[in-house]
Image (spheres, helix red, strand yellow):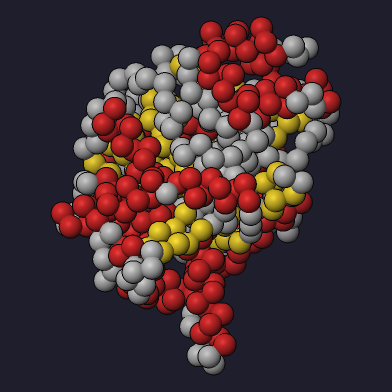
Amino acid sequence: MEAQMKLETCSLGIELGSTRIKAVLIDRDHNPIAQGDFTWENQFNDGVWTYPMELVHSGVQTCFANLKADVKAKFGEELTTVGALGVSAMMHGYLPFDKDGKQLAEFRTWRNTITGEAARKLTDLFGFNIPQRWSIAHLYQAILSGEAHVKDIAYLTTLAGYIHWRLTGEKVMGIGEASGMFPIDSNTNDYDAAMLEKFDTISGMPYSLKDILPKVLVAGENAGTLTEAGARFLDPSGTLQAGIPVAPCEGDAGTGMAATNSVRVRIGNVSAGTSDFAMIVTDKPLGVHREIDMVTTPAGAPVAMVHCNNCTSDINAWVNLFSEYSALMGTPVHKGELYTKLFEVALQGDPDCGGLLSYNYFSGEGVTDLDEGRPIFARKQNASFTLANFMRTHLLSALATLKIGLDILTKAENVQIDKLYGHGGFFKTPGVGQRMLSAAVGAPVSVMETAGEGGPYGMALLAAYMIRKDVGESLADYLDNKVFLNAKTATLTASEGDIQGFSKFLETYKTALPVEKLATEVL
């Protein structure tokens, strides 16, 4: 291995995303040099979106084994150690454990919309929006529903917090991830004390809420070291050595901010994959909006978040159908090429999609107040039913709910956005998803060369920051001066026609929402 790629100077980020577990290894210059992954899907069991914990364990181990193989193939080295590592995962959800570490209920993911009563009551109690997917909403709903296990909870965490606990033995997490469990006070960089007290008065539980939540840490703090048991959990082969410093675990929102250098005020990023969300760092308190979540950067600054449960799942389903058709005709096409061709043809579609309409709701959607989803494609009799319009419809549909939420942020709250970065699978085909997002927000959208690396890359950067920051150096300064100073960025602005076309599409989309609502009732 070349000198600048010595393992001790590398940092490792592992992220458990909705459809892939991915590991990215970066060198001392913050360049991705190796990766591994594992593909998985959530399951809908007994009315709950979940992942079996056995699959969580085997998936993380397979991902790491694939990373090791990549390092061996590229550099002829065994991956025995790194300078620092960190774990992130899809935010929110519910993972309760008793005092002996026994899991008390199935892992309930962010995708669930089964906590409506709890979310409404907590929002009223706190005067602060509590979305359905937040951990506190899941806990309170379990209390309201009389679930027997709630009285035995000794530790409540998220998927990232759980993996971090397995690796280090530490019940801690980064502040951005913690902000998706319970509201954060950015003045103290801890859970909001007044809201904790209010919850304890209504919970009826034999414990105080703060006693069962992870300790909050900010980016740059040490969150423990890899134990022998943690090393064997991650790498059952026994090659990986214990003792590696581990950064505070983060959520996919926080790692997305780090990966796109979006941690300063009035800078935002949009992550678009299975779900999509926009994160805008704010410089002022906002009113309470059901569509807007207040979370934090990994350093603790307040962030307005528009989160949508559904983005690319419906697109993936249609691409799979086209893949089946090409195989049926005896000319199978590689999935990657199929995605590229179908995304590119969307650029030839009518700006308003020519009378076609789709709702990409595989699951419920908080922004549009739907507890369940049914994917729908519809068209007018005289619509221009072309492949280009068909694909453009699905791309705009993937962003439509996000735009509804962003309009509240920019118009009702007058939040200023100076820069907007895109990252995630939706932006993989150059210029296409970027142009559609620009049409949605009516502003330039930038995509970095490393955007495809996404969350695990951002987690690796946070691990590097922990061990390599200068005294007093902020995360924003570290990213500006040491990571992204010479970053290659492509910026694109949609045409006025694209912007007007999206607005016209969205008006039809909002007007026809009762069709989607009816579908959840009759299908």
The percent coordinates of residue 372 (x first, y second) are: 60, 45
Residue that protrudes farthest toward the bottom in the picture: 330
**Where on the picture, by quarter, is residue 475?**
top left
The percent coordinates of residue 39 (x first, y second) are: 61, 61
Q: Please name the residue shown 26% across and 66% down the image.
A: 350
Count the labels in the image.
0
Residue that protrudes farthest toward the front in the picture: 381
Q: Please name the residue shown 66% across and 16% down the image.
A: 209
Q: Can residue 288 be seen in this view?
A: yes
Q: In which quarter of the image is the C terminus?
A: bottom right
> In the rendered view, does 70 fall on the left or right side of 287?
right
Residue that protrudes farthest toward the left in the picture: 496
Q: Please name the residue shown 52% across and 78% down the image.
A: 323
Query: Viewer-proximal residue, 417 or 8?
Result: 417
Query: Viewer-proximal residue, 93 or 169?
Result: 93
Q: Please name the residue shown 44% across and 76% down the image.
A: 338
> In the rendered view, does 131 fall on the left or right side of 3?
right
Q: Is residue 309 visible?
A: no
The answer to whether residue 263 is above or below residue 452 is above
The answer to whether residue 341 is above or below residue 449 is below
Query: Viewer-proximal residue, 345 or 507?
Result: 507
The percent coordinates of residue 194 (x first, y second) are: 53, 8
The percent coordinates of residue 385 (x first, y second) are: 36, 72
The answer to whether residue 231 is above or below residue 287 is below
